[in-house]
Amino acid sequence: ASIKAIRAAAGAQSVRVLQDELPEPLKRRQECIVMASCGEEATLQQVVTMVLDRVFDRSGLPASAERERDRPYVLDLIVPERAGGGIVGPGGERIRAIIE
């Protein structure tokens, strides 16, 4: 689904791909940065799920041979600073468990 379709389906206030407002080093990256802002947690979860479905969807690749080809799944997830402690956990135990 496109960002426009995700926005419409989820009824999210703001789902967009950042471009012009990014600093130069981020503009040069090949990846896109998607920002979602929603009034309710359930809506945000729906948006994140839809974006992740799009990230891992291989059907947009041109040829079936290309779809079969191994390609890495990479996702850089930026969270608000206040959520960082909950992700890292006491003494870093949660983040170590995620990595393992």
Image: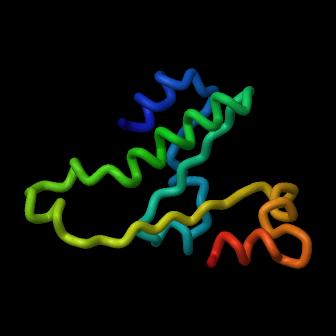
Above or below, 29 relative to 47: below
Left or right, 28 with reference to 87: left
Left or right, 55 with reference to 92: left
80 vs 73, nearest the viewer? 73
Q: Quadrant of the N terminus?
A: top left
> Residue at the location (12% across, 55% down)?
62
1 vs 25, nearest the viewer? 1
86 vs 6, nearest the viewer? 86
> Residue at the location (56% across, 43% down)?
48
Left or right, 19 with reference to 40: left
> Residue at the location (19% across, 70% down)?
69
Q: Quadrant of the C terminus?
A: bottom right
Residue 2 coordinates in the image, percent (x, y): 37, 37
Residue 37 coordinates in the image, percent (x, y): 67, 37
Residue 81 coordinates in the image, percent (x, y): 83, 60
Left or right, 12 with reference to 71: right
The answer to which quarter of the image holds residue 63 is: bottom left
> Residue at the location (40% across, 53% down)?
55
Residue 9 coordinates in the image, percent (x, y): 47, 23
What scheme was used to colour the molecule? rainbow
Above or below, 55 relative to 50: below
User: How many discs appear?
Assistant: 0
Above or below, 61 relative to 42: below
Above or below, 28 relative to 10: below
The answer to which quarter of the image holds residue 66 is: bottom left
